[in-house]
Amino acid sequence: MNQAADGENKQSLLGDITKVSGAFEGSEGIALARELARTFLTDVQVVHGLPVSERAMGMVQLVVSELVTNARRYAPGPCLLDLEINGGVVEVTVWDSNPTPPTILAPDPTRVGQHGLEIVMTVGHSFAIHREPVGKRITTTIVLADDPNGDAAGRQP
């Protein structure tokens, strides 16, 4: 599968690593990116037999939606999405052409809007922003399986 702006996607299996990538442009790209994430995680379960909790399925789609929405809103041109399984986590990376790092606002329940990165940082196991020669990459990881108590496995408080 090869995911590109026209709806194609790319998947490879290398040892314990499974990956899919997509390029998205326009507002319809947000829904396509969520669908790519859902299909990818479903295949990870069905084809590769890796456990993916319902929580992880929902959180990955939420994170993809927030990151792709920000990329579409603040950067010209397409954005690139990579989803990679490595061990018990899915790494979600979104690249866009704007080199300016996003402003990370302190939590404020009275603020209307601009909670996307706050959500991503809360539900993710890790979070990083990397400047690139062109643009930037934002990466977070989501644990795939829940522990028996229903908490994200390995989540740091």
Image (cartoon, rainbow, N blue to C red):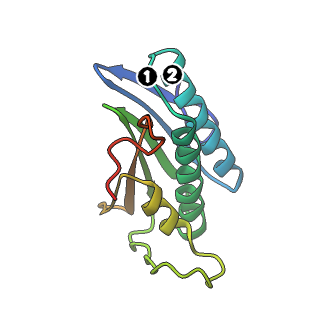
Residue 106 pos. (x, y %): 45, 81
Work out whether 89 lies above or below 99.
Answer: above
User: Which of the two residues, 147 or 12, is positioned nearer the viewer here?
Assistant: 147
Q: Tell whether 90 sits left or right of 154.
A: right
User: Which of the two residues, 148 or 9, is positioned nearer the viewer here?
Assistant: 148
Work out whether 20 lies above or below 143.
Answer: above
Q: Are marks 1 and 2 in contact (CB under 8 Å)?
A: yes
The image quadrant where one finds the C terminus is bottom left
Q: Quadrant of residue 149?
A: top left
User: Which of the two residues, 108 or 69, is positioned nearer the viewer here?
Assistant: 108
Does dot 2 land on a helix, a strand or a loop? helix
Residue 50 pos. (x, y %): 43, 22
Q: Quadrant of residue 98?
A: bottom left
| Residue positioned 62% across, 43% down in the render | 34
| Residue positioned 49% across, 78% down in the render | 107
Q: CA distance from mark 1 to mark 2?
A: 5 Å
Tag 2 or tag 1, which sits nearer the N-term? Answer: 2
Which amino acid type is shown beneath numbered disc 1?
Answer: Leu
Looking at the rendered structure, which numbered label has been put on residue 157?
A: none
Work out whether 123 lies above or below 38.
Answer: below
Q: Residues within 10 Å of mark 2 (few under 14, many from 20)?
A: some
| Residue positioned 56% across, 56% down in the render | 68
- Name the residue beneath numbered marker 2: 45
- Name the residue beneath numbered marker 1: 50
Work out whether 59 lies above or below 117.
Answer: above
Does dot 1 land on a helix, a strand or a loop? loop
| Residue positioned 31% across, 54% down in the render | 156
